[in-house]
Structures are given as C-alpha cells and as structure tokens.
Amino acid sequence: MKRNIVIATLTAAALAGGTVVAFAAGDDESAARPATGTNVRVVSDRDDDTDDRSDDTEDRTTVRGSGVSAAEAIAAALRHTPGTAVSAELEDDGADAGTWNVDVVRSDGAEYDVNVSGAGKVLGAYRDNDEGDDDNDSEDRAESAALKGAKFDAHKAALTAAAKGTVTEIDADDDSGAVAWNVATVKAGTTSEWSVAVDTGKITRVQSDED
C-alpha cells in the first residue's frame, strides 16, 4: 500500500513538470533507495575550471592604479618642488595606494620626497635628512649630476616606457657603468623591467615575469 502511494505521488509530480527527489520504501526495508527520474541535475566540470582560472589570476601581478600616470606625477612634483626628479614609485597597497612618491633633488643638493595623490594633487614635500655613508653620498651626487640636464629626464623616460605598459616605478641605475633609467611596467598582469638611455631614450627590456 505504501509503495502504491509513493509511486502515485511521484507520477503526479512528474506530470506537473516538477523536479523530484524521492526515496522509495520497500515493504520490509527501512533503508531508502534513491528514485531514478528524468529530471536529474548533473554537476559540470565548469566549477573546477573556474577554480583553475582563479588560481591563475592570483599568480598574476595586480596593481592598484592611480588616476595619474608616472609622467604626470613627476610633472606635478617638479612644479611644486623644482629640481631634478631621480625616482618615482607608485604605492599599490594600504591606505596610500594610488599615491606617487617622487624623489626630487634641488639645485642646492637637498633631496625631497614629494607625495602626489591619485588625483594629481601634491600632498606634501618632505626633506630627506637621512645621512648615509660617504660612498653612497658620492654615488648619489654622481647620479644626480648625470641626470641633471639629461635629454631624457625621468618625465620623458616614463613617457617612453608607458608604451610598454603601466609604469609603476622609475629610478636611476648605474649598475652597467653608465647611468640609465630603470623602469618597471605592468601589462596584462605581467611585470617587466626596462632600461631607458638618458641620452637617446633607447629602451631595452631587462627582464620579465615571463622569462
């Protein structure tokens, strides 16, 4: 009798177009058996594919961008604090994300850290009073002298490298024996480093995440 009632209920539900999840009980069995029907939900492999894509995304470099480019931030910093821009770096984490830190050396040799907001507004300029050793000071002075009046200054170097991706950092580098601009860019999640000659503006890739 119980079997007839269950079968009748399932049949009525199927005719009504509903999805049925039921258990048929035997006369002498207390264990339930899943009923088999045409309305069966099949779990696809797409969830696994989504997880794989998420893992790939996490492996990529993510940059919280700024409303102004590196070149624009450098220009704003120099309007506020005239001198020679020797580096610029984009903050991409924490409360300062989207803010640029631009190092400017004035004509008297004083170095300032100029903070530029994502809207291009100068938030402040702070003199760097850290005293390093004589060797480092000498190297810094040599770099500043090489960059002062360079045909491709930090602003132009940033514009040149922008063709390769979003510029996130630029600074002077003399590891090769000659001062050049070292620029970091991000494009399609890949970080690359470039060298930009201060005299010709020639850009050369140094390395990439894909290497």
Image (cartoon, grey):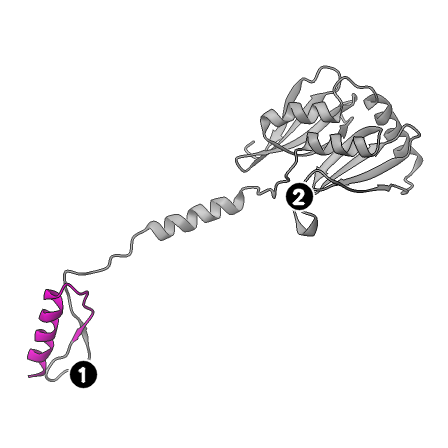
Q: Is residue 31 left or right of residue 154?
A: left
Viewer-nearest residue: 52 or 169: 169
Q: Which residue is mark 2?
A: 98
At label 1, the amino acid type is Ser
Measuring 14% from the left and 79% from the top, which residue is drawn there? Answer: 25
Residue count near mark 1 (Cα–Cα under 10 Å), binned few <14, some 14–19, many ≥20: few
Residue 1 % position (x, y) = 6, 84
Measuring 76% from the left and 28% from the top, which residue is drawn there? Answer: 173
Determine if the magenta segment contains residue 14.
Answer: yes
Judge whether 65 appears above or below 157 on screen: below
- Residue at mark 2 to residue at mark 1: CA–CA distance: 65 Å
Residue 39 % position (x, y) = 17, 61
The local secondary structure at tag 1 comes to loop
Q: What count of labels does the image hold?
A: 2
Q: Are marks 2 and 1 in contact (CB under 8 Å)?
A: no
At label 2, the amino acid type is Gly
To which quarter of the image does residue 162 belong? top right
Judge whether 194 appears above or below 168 on screen: above
Measuring 91% from the left and 31% from the top, which residue is drawn there? Answer: 109
Q: Main secondary structure of the magenta part?
A: helix
Determine if the magenta segment contains residue 194.
Answer: no
Where are the magenta residues, as a range?
1-23
The local secondary structure at tag 2 comes to loop
Quadrant in the picture for the C terminus: top right
Tag shown at residue 30 = 1
Judge whether 205 appears above or below 189 on screen: above
Residue 64 % position (x, y) = 61, 44
Tag shown at residue 203 = none
Residue count near mark 2 (Cα–Cα under 10 Å), binned few <14, some 14–19, many ≥20: many
Viewer-nearest residue: 201 or 126: 126
- Disc 2 or 1, which lies upstream in sequence? 1
